[in-house]
């Protein structure tokens, strides 16, 4: 009886050890993935801040008009002349 109890305890400790080893491996893999994603996050946060600043700048009607005129837009009644340089 004592032998069976000892064998059961050894098997239980072995099974728990294997389970803990599997959890450790999974934790390591998830930590690597988290580190990779954290590295990708910083540039995206920087780009987001730049886009928000640009959107705030274009919120001003005068700045918006300047940008639209650069793209070739004109107010009603105005004519757009496009100069093409000689080659």
Image (cartoon, helix red, strand yellow):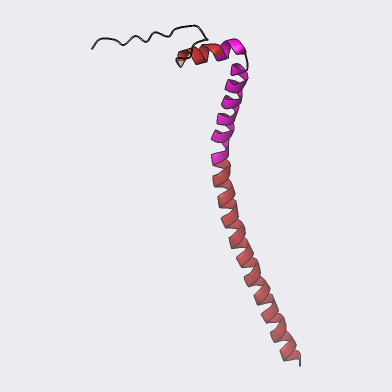
Please say if 82 is above or below 46: above
- The spot of residue 39 in percent (x, y) is 55, 41
Residue under the point 62% across and 58% down: 27
- The spot of residue 3 in percent (x, y) is 72, 90
Asked if the stretch drawn in magenta spans residue 70, the answer is: no
Q: Nearer the viewer, residue 37 or 55?
A: 55
User: Which secondary structure is most common in the magenta stretch?
Assistant: helix
Asked if the stretch drawn in magenta spans residue 48, the answer is: yes
Q: Quadrant of residue 22?
A: bottom right
Q: Residue furthest bottom?
A: 1
Q: Residue furthest front?
A: 77
Q: Which portion, as a residue range, is magenta?
A: 40-64
- The spot of residue 24 in percent (x, y) is 62, 61
Q: Nearer the viewer, residue 27 or 72?
A: 72
Please say if 68 is above or below 33: above
Q: Quadrant of residue 51?
A: top right
């Amino acid at each position: 009886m004592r032998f069976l109890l000892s064998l059961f305890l050894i098997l239980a400790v072995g099974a728990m050890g294997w389970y803990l080893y599997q959890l450790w491996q999974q934790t390591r893999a998830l930590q690597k993935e988290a580190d990779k994603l954290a590295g990708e996050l910083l540039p995206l946060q920087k780009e987001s801040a730049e886009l928000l600043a640009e959107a705030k700048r274009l919120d001003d009607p005068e700045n918006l008009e300047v940008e639209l005129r650069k793209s070739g837009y004109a107010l009603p009644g105005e004519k757009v002349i496009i100069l093409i340089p000689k080659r």
